[in-house]
Image: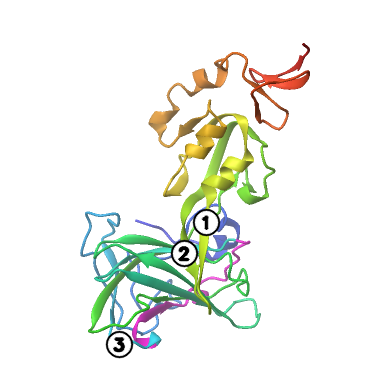
Amino acid sequence: MKKFFLLATLFATTVCNAQTVLWDGEDESVTSRNQFGGWWDRGNPSVVENPEKDGINTSEKCLKFTMTGNDFGQKHVALPFRDWMTPDLQGNRRFSFMIKKAQNENVKVEVSDPTNGANNYWEKTAAWYGGAGKWQKVVLDFSTNVNMNDYPGVFAIEAQTVSVDEPQDVYIDNVVIEPMPMVSGKKLADIEDNSLTGNVVVTGSLMRGDCQNANDNWFRVDYDDFAILKDKLAATAVSLDLRGVILKDQYFDQIQEKCPEIKIILTDDDITGIQAVTTAPQVAHTYFDLQGRRVAHPENGLYILHGKKVVLKK
């Protein structure tokens, strides 16, 4: 069960490091959110028992609303989280939520109403729901929505962008701001390429996928934190600790190709033997340059061998 104590106070300092829950249904009603507000009365929303707890969403409760027509107002619900927090995304642009509905189709999200007094906006991003009636986690990356700032206040979910032929129930849960990937308190994107070596501990989230910038002329938006992490790692990295990371569509092939000696730690069980991996010598005659790149045929010069700097003279 998720906790919300002091959320408004802690939001500005935790949004980059921890998943920030905007709504999850466990401790909430539709009309009250920490005594400040809740979902707007669109689509007749109600909190109900989770109709399917054996999939990826095992929560006891969730939100249910009904799409009744083809206008935006008849196909969406809106969450004004500005009523209980003043956000500062600190550059983060990634949201997600759980959704379960009958028809596979694009789900569109609009964020709006900045809380810092800036001009209003409606920034739109869409992602494909292919759950076939099952719960699916939908991730929206707003990194290409240039008008959006760090202080959005309303989150509106249009559960279907094509026509609704007859009333259709939709279930929503776990609306969150995903945490930014961090290493040693620094944003992954701000770290110098080929600089992470030794035992690397990552926090936040690592995700890979695509969505659509849906403002006017839709266009595809790809995001791949694993590729960014690969660029930041030196070839001499020994271990990659991801035990506290939220993962989506994990893909380590490129990382393991660049860092052939690396051990990827996903659970506590994976930590077994890490000390031996850390101290064991590398394969003989495996040289790296000072940027951590493997050198197949080294010439005279300064290299890294077995974790130490050596001068090679032929």
Q: Is residue 82 magenta?
A: yes
Chain-order first, disc 3 or disc 2: 3
Instruction: State how far apart marks 2 and 1 are (Cα).
Output: 8 Å
At 38% across and 30% down in the image, what residue appears?
269
Q: Position of residue 278 (x, y in %)?
A: 55, 21
The coloring applied to the image is rainbow
Tell me where the magenta segment starts and ends, as one range: 73-91
Residue with the mark numbered 1: 223
Q: Are discs 2 and 1 less than 8 Å apart at CB?
A: yes
At 55% across and 52% down in the image, what residue appears?
17
At 45% across and 43% down in the image, what residue appears?
251
Q: Position of residue 299 (x, y in %)?
A: 75, 19
Residue with the mark numbered 2: 211
Q: Image height check: is 75 above or below 14?
A: below
Q: Amino acid at mark 3?
A: Gly
Q: Image height check: is 307 above or below 6?
A: above
Chain-order first, disc 2 or disc 1: 2
Along the line of sight, the residue nearer the viewer: 13 or 263: 263
Q: Amino acid at mark 2?
A: Cys
Name the element at disc 3: loop
Chain-order first, disc 3 or disc 1: 3
Q: Position of residue 64 (x, y in %)?
A: 28, 74
Residue with the mark numbered 3: 69
